[in-house]
């Protein structure tokens, strides 16, 4: 058992998980970084989602921004990765690697209904 801080799950185990919104916040530095990279955004920030697996908390965190069309989007991969304590493994227990995991998580997050939770959270922070 490796003691590197990662929780190791097979893809099928991960696919069965249901993440819940933990928190979201606007961050001026995210918007500034996006503008410096040539990406126009109305606002931007961070969000974190968690779930439990066998008594351990799994966390996913990523940067988001509100586009000029007023839609929330994940920051492109070249401008921000996904923070996680998850390591996906193959059926024989080998780590799939951070590049594979980041691509896999982006696909998974793209079908999660995260937009409304983030919008609700930042609206509450503004009031």
Image (cartoon, grey):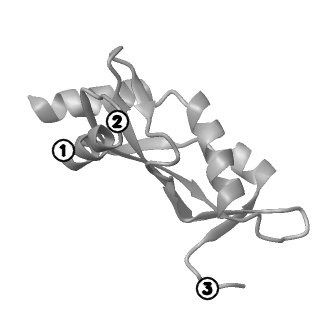
Residue 118, given in percent of the width and then of the height, sits at 34, 32
Q: Quadrant of the C terminus?
A: top left
Which one is earlier in the sequence, the residue at label 3 or at label 1?
A: 3
Is 92 displayed left or right of 44 in the figure? right
Rounded to the nearest angstrom, the CA distance separating label 1 from label 2 is 15 Å
Residue 34, given in percent of the width and then of the height, sits at 32, 41
Q: Residue at x 29, y 47 (%)?
A: 33
Asked if marks 1 and 2 touch (Cβ < 8 Å), the reply is: no
Residue 59 shows in the view: no
Q: Which residue is mark 3?
A: 3
Q: Nearer the viewer, mark 3 or mark 1?
A: 1
* Mark 3: secondary structure: loop
Which one is earlier in the sequence, the residue at label 3 or at label 2?
A: 3
Q: Which label was assigned to residue 38?
A: 2
Q: Quadrant of the N terminus?
A: bottom right
- In the foreground, 107 or 68: 68
Seen from this angle, which residue lies furthest left?
127
Rounded to the nearest angstrom, the CA distance separating label 3 from label 1 is 35 Å
Residue 110, given in percent of the width and then of the height, sits at 58, 32
Q: Which residue is mark 1?
A: 28
């Amino acid at each position: 058992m490796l003691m590197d801080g990662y929780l190791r799950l097979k893809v099928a185990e991960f696919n069965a998980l249901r993440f819940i919104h933990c928190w979201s916040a606007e961050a001026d530095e995210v918007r500034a970084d996006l503008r410096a990279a040539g990406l126009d955004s109305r606002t931007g920030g961070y969000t974190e989602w968690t779930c439990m697996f066998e008594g351990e908390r799994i966390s996913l965190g990523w940067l988001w921004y509100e586009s000029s069309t007023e839609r929330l989007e994940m920051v492109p991969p070249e401008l921000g990765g996904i923070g996680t304590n998850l390591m996906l493994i193959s059926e024989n227990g080998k780590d799939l690697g951070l590049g594979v995991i980041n691509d896999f998580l982006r696909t998974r997050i793209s079908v999660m209904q995260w937009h409304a939770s983030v919008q609700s959270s930042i609206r509450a922070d503004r009031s």
